[in-house]
Image (tube, rainbow, N blue to C red):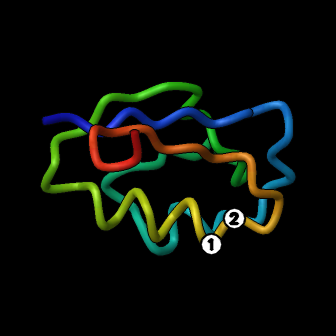
Amino acid sequence: MTVKITVNVAGCVGHARCAAVAPDVYELDDDGFNTTAYREAEESLRAQAVRGMRACPEKIITIEDEENR
C-alpha cells in the first residue's frame, strides 16, 4: 500500500515544520518552502507523512490512503 501526499505548494509560507518532523517525506527549497506537490510514499513513511501534515499551520497538506477512505 502507498500513501498519496498532496501539498498545495502555493499556500506554503515557509514555516518548514513539515520537513522538521518528516524529513524523509517532504522536500523544501533553499528558502524553506515545501516543493512536494505530489508524492506517493511507501507505507513505512505513513506515520512521518501524517506528523508533517499535522505540523503544518496552514493545513495545506492532505494524505490519502486506503485507511482514510
Q: Dividing the image into 4 quarters, which one contains the C terminus? A: top left
Q: Please, which residue is most extreme toward the front here?
A: 69
Position in image of residue 63 (x %, y %): 48, 44
Number of other residues with Cα within 10 Å of mark 2, as a class: few under 14, some 14 to 19, many 20 or more: some
Q: Are marks 1 and 2 in contact (CB under 8 Å)?
A: yes
Residue sitting nearer the eye, 28 or 48: 48
Position in image of residue 42 (x %, y %): 16, 41
Q: Is residue 19 above or below residue 40?
A: below
Amino acid under disc 2: Cys
Residue at point 58%, 43% (across, down)? 62
Secondary structure of residue under mark 2: loop
Position in image of residue 45 (x %, y %): 23, 55
Residue sitting nearer the eye, 6 or 28: 6
Q: CA distance from mark 1 to mark 2?
A: 4 Å
The disc label shown at residue 55, or none: 1
Q: Quadrant of residue 55?
A: bottom right
Number of other residues with Cα within 10 Å of mark 1, as a class: few under 14, some 14 to 19, many 20 or more: some
Q: Dividing the image into 4 quarters, which one contains the N terminus? A: top left
Q: Quadrant of residue 66?
A: top left
Residue on which the image places disc 2: 56
Horizontal relation, residue 52 to residue 1: left or right: right
Exactly how many numbered labels are in the figure? 2
Horizontal relation, residue 58 to residue 32: left or right: right
Residue at point 40%, 29% (across, down)? 39
Position in image of residue 50 (x %, y %): 44, 62
Residue at point 75%, 56% (across, down)? 59
Secondary structure of residue under mark 1: helix
Amino acid under disc 1: Ala
Horizontal relation, residue 67 to residue 64: left or right: left
